[in-house]
Image (cartoon, rainbow, N blue to C red):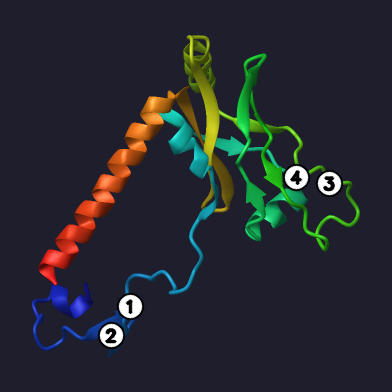
Amino acid sequence: MTGLALLGYNAPFADLCMVGPIIRPKPDNCFMSKKKPGTPSSTIALNKKAKHEYHIEDRFEAGLALQGWEVKSLRAGKAQLVDAYVLLKNGEAWLLGAHITPLNTASTHVVADPTRTRKLLLHAKEIAKIVGQVSKEGYTCIPLALYWKKNKVKCEIALVKGKKLYDKRATEKERDWNRQKQRILRDANA
């Protein structure tokens, strides 16, 4: 809101912006900065197989302890979570099997291990809850996604229970029926 609008001069000065003591024509981004078009999404990697293989019970956001070359590789989008899982040992959570491909230019002076064990940063209460659930029959913990949150890399992990074969078939059948419904509705409206 401009200083003139506060005084009650709303209508004639609606397209003006007050910058300090100077009044200028109002640009599009006078008071708020907008996200630049074409900026990449914050998602680095997804575990697409997880939704097909497991029933997702509960989700957690965990930080990730990384080395410098890993961060550079993640900025380039070189990560896979296909066969990754979470190991809980001595009150700590570890990410195993996640593959971060090293960049040739970033890791020249370091021996880079693409599948090294990485520590997940969680609160003690969250770890206790996960350990309690995983100790039950049929539950496990897997990573669902890697993404940027501000300038930090976060890992979304989930408590999951394995699907039976008939559950997978039912999910696929429902997905096919929804796809057919959309086609029928689209053809009826066209």
Viewed as shown, does residue 176 lie left or right of 69? left
Residue in the foreground of this view, choosing between 140 and 9: 140
Please give the name of the residue rendered at 60% of the width and 42% of the height, measured from the top-left corner: 81
Residue 36 lies, in percent from the top left, at: 44, 73
Tag 3: amino acid: Ala
Residue 82: name its quadrant: top right
Q: Is residue 15 visible?
A: yes
Task: Name which of mark 3 and mark 4 comes first in the sequence.
Answer: 4
- For marks 1 and 4, give the CA distance: 40 Å
Tag 2: amino acid: Lys
Q: Nearer the viewer, mark 2 or mark 3?
A: 3
- For marks 3 and 4, give the CA distance: 10 Å
**Crowding at label 3, few (<14), some or many (≥20) Cα neighbours within 10 Å?**
some
Residue in the foreground of this view, choosing between 47 and 110: 47
Give the residue pinned by disc 1. 30
Tag 4: amino acid: Gln
Residue in the foreground of this view, choosing between 187 and 138: 187
- For marks 3 and 1, give the CA distance: 46 Å
Residue 128 lies, in percent from the top left, at: 51, 15
**Crowding at label 2, few (<14), some or many (≥20) Cα neighbours within 10 Å?**
some
Give the residue pinned by disc 3. 112
Residue 145 lies, in percent from the top left, at: 52, 43
Residue ranking furthest to the right: 109
Give the residue pinned by disc 4. 67
Callout 3–callout 4 Cβ contact below 8 Å: no
Viewed as shown, does residue 31 lie left or right of 186? right
Callout 2–callout 3 Cβ contact below 8 Å: no
Give the residue pinned by disc 2. 26
Please give the name of the residue rendered at 15% of the width and 60% of the height, measured from the top-left corner: 185
